[in-house]
Amino acid sequence: MTYCVGMVLDKGLVMMSDTRTNSGVDNISVFKKMFHWAVPGDRILSIMTAGNLATTQAVISQLEERTKAPGDRDNSLLKAPTMFQVASEIGKLLRETITKTQEDNGARGKGRFTASIILGGQIEGMEPRLFHIYPEGNFIEASFDTPFFQIGETKYGRPILIRGYDKDMSFEDAVKLVMVSFDSTLKANLSVGLPLDLMVIERDTFQAGHVRRISSDDPYFQSISSSWGDALKTAFHSLPNYSIPDK
Amino acid sequence: MTYCVGMVLDKGLVMMSDTRTNSGVDNISVFKKMFHWAVPGDRILSIMTAGNLATTQAVISQLEERTKAPGDRDNSLLKAPTMFQVASEIGKLLRETITKTQEDNGARGKGRFTASIILGGQIEGMEPRLFHIYPEGNFIEASFDTPFFQIGETKYGRPILIRGYDKDMSFEDAVKLVMVSFDSTLKANLSVGLPLDLMVIERDTFQAGHVRRISSDDPYFQSISSSWGDALKTAFHSLPNYSIPDK
């Protein structure tokens, strides 16, 4: 499995992904699931992937090739005029990649090799935007009502995001929030694992502003992980007490 | 879906279940998923069910009949000498019920009509015990290392249980804890719904000590739901701040 969160704030975008891949519990590996492309002054695009690793690597490799091959350059991510068109192009590539592997495998391929993508970014003159791209190639965009997307193992870390998110929060608070969400997920599910990749994209900078890999010995993540347990217990004990009447 | 939690404490057992059943989002109903049988001074047995409603109702009806039909009385839950044998009997009945409906439906029945059960209870002279019974009829028992079981939509409410559980906690704190766990789940997933059923089984009493239905207008549940949001925010802000270095 995988866990990735992308979040839109007034100030920009925050993206975080884990790096664990597994094929059964006895075959786990570390693979990067976050990728970005930037054109200074023009655009920043960041992608996080979940699902079949061969599919997502194929998609990323093809996107990477398109940004480099001179003949194809006009079709590339780096020339599309809007984030909507970038999302459409990535969705089409994702669907084609999945469909091809499924067809190559005939009846055995049915329903397999799927993957999802979170795309965040900003193109000059427009707002920062965040998309959730489905294996079918279509996609939805984050909005005021649903300002963050999760892919992969989304459930454990969702309640704190729902409760803690605020669109005018600082990047520092937003990073803290996604770290708590990841910590809850890591504690509950072996298929999500450290290290984590973090990227902060400040509005109108068109670059990956703060890119970090957070490993298990990261002192800040360790302090969040240990103090969140205590803070939760304190929060829990601050709630009104239940009373059971005497029989 | 469904959400049920059963928990073993030093003091006894706490069980809580929701009541929502759905067949698609446009067909939701309220059905009780918690049932109990008591023989004063001898035993208390409590069951919570998740999965196909026709399956679980058939299992409960058959268990109920067995406790009443005079000829079958020797085979009943109310005579089995240990909780292990009670769990075995329920597991067998669950597997047989599922298998029969699957076979009646031929190829279309494959993999369908499954259900799971949490069984908690105590028989005189023995410890309170808690079991998770699978559709296959086999089961596992809660232990020191894993002192609670969840069935149904388990993930949203798991992190707080992991963080908040303490085996020597009071019943009042345990009820508060499961309410917070349910609140997180209700906030995130439409397939889990109020009202909730609560049962507290105090060690060596052999009766359902505190049985309540918690509806949406329950003042205590409302106060937990609203103050937990605030308490989480306070907890979140009490964590050390992340710092993003200047570029």
Image (cartoon, coloured by chain):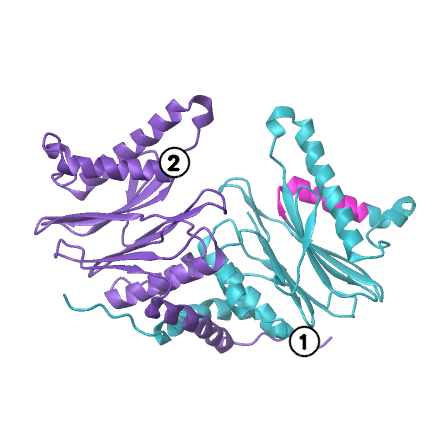
Chain colours: A cyan, B purple
Q: Which mark is residue A198?
A: none
Residue A245's quadrant in the figure? Answer: bottom left
Q: Which residue is mark 1?
A: B245
Is A59 situated above or below A144? above
Residue in the picture at 83% in, 46% down: A66
Q: Is residue B215 magenta?
A: no
In the rendered image, is residue B134 in sight?
Answer: no
Quarter placement of the C terminus of chain A: bottom left
Tell me where residue A56 appears, x and y as whole percent.
68, 44
Q: Chain of mark 2?
A: B
Between B110 and A145, the one lying in front of the other is A145
Tag 2 and tag 1, C-beta contact below 8 Å: no
Q: Amino acid at mark 2?
A: Thr
Residue in the picture at 43% in, 27% down: B109
Tell me where residue B121 appears, x and y as whole percent.
20, 49
Q: Which residue is mark 2?
A: B114
Extent of the magenta region: A50-65
Is B153 situated above or below B113? below
